[in-house]
Image: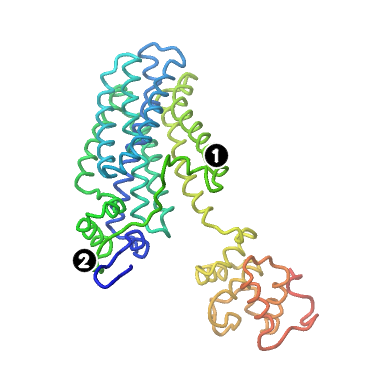
Amino acid sequence: METDNRTAFVDVAELIDQQPVSRFQIRVIALCAGVVFMDGFDTQAIGYVAPTLGKLWNLKPGALGPVFGAGLFGLMLGALIGGPLADRIGRKRVIILSTLAFGLCSLLTVTADSLNSLLLWRLATGLGLGGAMPNAIALTSEYSPQRSRATLVMIMFCGFSLGSALGGVFAARLIPSFGWTAVFWLGGILPIALSLLLVLALPESIRLLALRGSEDRRIRTILAHIAPALSFAAETRFVAREERLSGFTVRHLFGGGRALGTALLWVMFFMNLLDLYFLANWLPTVISNAGIAVEIAVIITTLLQIGGVAGAVSGRRLSRRRPADCGDRHVRRLACPAHPHRLRRRLLHRRRADRRQCAVGILLSDGDPLDGRRLGPWDRPHRLDHRSRRRRHHLVAALANDVAVPDRRAAGLLRRRGRSRHGPPADGAGGRPWSDRR
């Protein structure tokens, strides 16, 4: 926050970064997740009904390829149009209009009676799908604090894979009983109902409101939901600092040494989406043509989307680990300062726990972890509780030399503990070193 004699300026992005995640922000993320959920449902819907359409319309293998391509081409156009349009009229309006558009087009898809009409409706549906997704991601990012932004966006975007997966579950039940049109009826009614909810509950982008410079009242209302404890004077002005780029903005992706990174990211996303949409669209048809029932083929395809959710969650967990955390799995966990008590008790309760794990776990806890009187009778490691104090120090000193501890502070702690009170243990004290014993 910057102030002069009369006016206070508040950077809305910095303010959000300083606050804990509120219920209001969770509501925004949930609404955006609902949008991408229906986006995933309607994107995948044509793949689920393709085997049934091929049999009903007596289509040749590969005849639905142009229909699949038209939907993806419309999705690309919608993304290219929706982003710049949202910067002008607001993300809320574009998200609502896009959701309403692909819901209506999905309803109208049931009127298709030929490949040409089906192709046109899938193209129109793709325009709405493409406009909704990037703006939902951007809105989630703007209302998420920087420290947890990647995680919240990942959680929100899992709605796409969940929508595709549950769409397969619904399709497997609906198609045998009500025909292929039931999938598009469901994929049309739900987005239309969701768009009405978005009108009432979804806020506008706080960053865009700050950039306009004349929406301080609306921003103050939003911030009252995010940080109720804060109050702002009447003359407070809200700003959003960002670098303004001139000319063709895509050109800047290849400037400043970013050309190679941009190209590699494009190739990665190209291959990722190529595999994703190829499998999502064609897998039900290929499996059905192999003689497997349509409902079974649809369920098998849903596993692809469930795997996408699992991959997103596990990938996020791996991305949060530092390179220094690589190494022995148990020592890596023990060296984490966030879990000393829980891990210490878990290790000490294991009768056959490894000596190294026990020693490192004890040393990373608080107090004087080598003092048996401080641990309590049930808290002592079973391999250490009957050893003399001096021999326990000897054990720790030996471990400091043959345990790969990734954290230098933990390794130093081991060595210091080995020398504490009694000094460095003499070679051969107590017989063979404990690190060599079994």
Which secondary structure, mark 2? loop
Q: In the image, what residue type sits under mark 1?
A: Ala
Of the numbered discs 1 and 2, the one sitting upstream in the chain is: 2
Q: Is residue 325 left or right of residue 429?
A: left
Q: Is residue 373 left or right of residue 230?
A: right
Of residues 145 and 87, the one nearer the viewer is: 87
Answer above or below: position of 83 versus 342.
above
Q: Residue at x 29, y 18 (%)?
A: 112
Which secondary structure, mark 1? helix
Per the model, the C-alpha gap separating discs 1 and 2 is 46 Å
Quarter holding the N terminus is bottom left
| Image quarter of residue 103 | top left
Few, some or many C-alpha atoms within 10 Å of disc 1 (few <14, some 14-19, many ≥20)?
A: few
Few, some or many C-alpha atoms within 10 Å of disc 2 (few <14, some 14-19, many ≥20)?
A: few
Q: In the image, what residue type sits under mark 2?
A: Glu
- Labelled disc at residue 235: 2
Where is mark 1, residue-wise? Answer: 263
Q: Position of residue 370 (x, y in %)?
A: 61, 81
Of residues 221 and 64, the one nearer the viewer is: 221
Q: Position of residue 415 (x, y in %)?
A: 68, 77
Quarter holding the C terminus is bottom right
Discs 1/2, front: 2
